[in-house]
Image (spheres, helix red, strand yellow):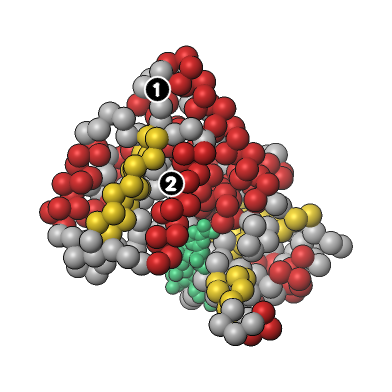
Amino acid sequence: MSATVIDGKAFAAKVRGQVAEHVTRLKDKHEITPGLAVVLVGEDPASQVYVRSKGKMTVEVGMKSVEHKLDADTSEADLLAVIDKLNNDASIHGILVQLPLPGHLNEDLVINSIDPAKDVDGFHISNVGLLGTGQKSMVPCTPLGCLMMLRDHHGSLSGMDAVVIGRSNIVGKPMAQLLLGDSCTVTIAHSRTKDLPEVVKRADIVVAAVGRPEMVPGDWIKPGATVIDVGINRLDAPEKGEGKTRLVGDVEYDSCAAVAGAISPVPGGVGPMTIACLLANTLTACCRANGLEEPAGLTA
Ligand code: NDP
């Protein structure tokens, strides 16, 4: 068997296209432009790349993009003042504080100071609680992207056995909640799980969010299962030249693709969906703020 490749790059382009169409309609019919503000503290090179690419794609779908770049030694009070200003800015519908923050800043405090209605990362404690109780919330972008890919591939997920490997607050736990919301039977595995291969082997859906390069081999996968690889791991690639690296996921792609029914690659799988879902969340937040109908298919 050779798995169907779930092309996250193409799917993300389609989602961004749908967002752009909605934005055009909002502008034409209601004279509203959705606005996304990204706050970056410090000069972490990877965060700078993410923020640049988020800003570029925000503009490409017709939204307003605002960036606040603050010095690495910015005080908590000054950061909270920036967030407070954005909370009260009616032209801003989504606020994202790029993580990780420098060590002297309390991440929980900062995230929970964002207006939950503008919390497009879905990390505010109110949104976590709303998702956990099956209520309308802002949903974290990476798990939302995985859910969209799974729904697109399968239609209904009802009754399927899903195993999520990883229990982080940003990926594993919200992913499990979303799958439960779609009526999967969900197991959350983690570093203390006993006999992980057997646990994974009973899954119709495997979502790997571990952060360990190529940890899941093909012989853990039930024939025909769907494998979603969230992992982003950079490995040295001397074969490509000195100092070069390559990206791999948390699953061993070739051996898993030989057994699975469908698989998302790395790169080109979940990664592009994350930014597409950030834009979808900003659109959703804008529609909610203005009492307008939410775009179908772009939320959980
Ligand atoms: P965390 O480090 O926060 O969580 C990793 C989880 O994996 C933990 O729950 C940990 O268990 C579990 N784990 C670690 N080792 C094992 C093991 N040997 N067996 C089973 N479980 C194990 O990572 P994140 O959730 O933040 O990210 C996971 C991966 O996803 C990373 O590669 C990250 O780069 C990627 N990522 C990709 C995104 C994208 O846009 N595509 C976005 C966000 C993350 P325990 O709790 O017991 O320690």
Mark 2 lies on a secondary structure that is helix
Question: On the image, numbered disc 1 is attached to which residue?
Answer: 32
Q: What residue sits 47% from the left and 46% below the top? A: 56
Q: Counting other residues with Cα less than 10 Å from the Cα at mark 2, is it few (<14), some (14-19), or many (20 or more)?
A: some
- Work out whether residue 156 can be spotted: yes
Residue that appears at 76% across and 71% down: 254
Please tell me whether residue 127 is drawn above or below residue 71 in the rendered image: above
Q: Position of residue 17 (x, y in %)?
A: 60, 35
Closer to us: mark 1 or mark 2? 2
Residue 94 quadrant: top left
For residue 55, which numbered disc appears in the image?
A: 2
Q: In the image, what residue type sits under mark 1?
A: Ile
Q: Quadrant of the N terminus?
A: bottom right
Residue drawn at point x = 48 percent, y = 17 percent: 28
Q: Residues within 10 Å of mark 1 (few under 14, many from 20)?
A: some
Q: Position of residue 102 (x, y in %)?
A: 26, 67
Amino acid at pointer 2 = Gly
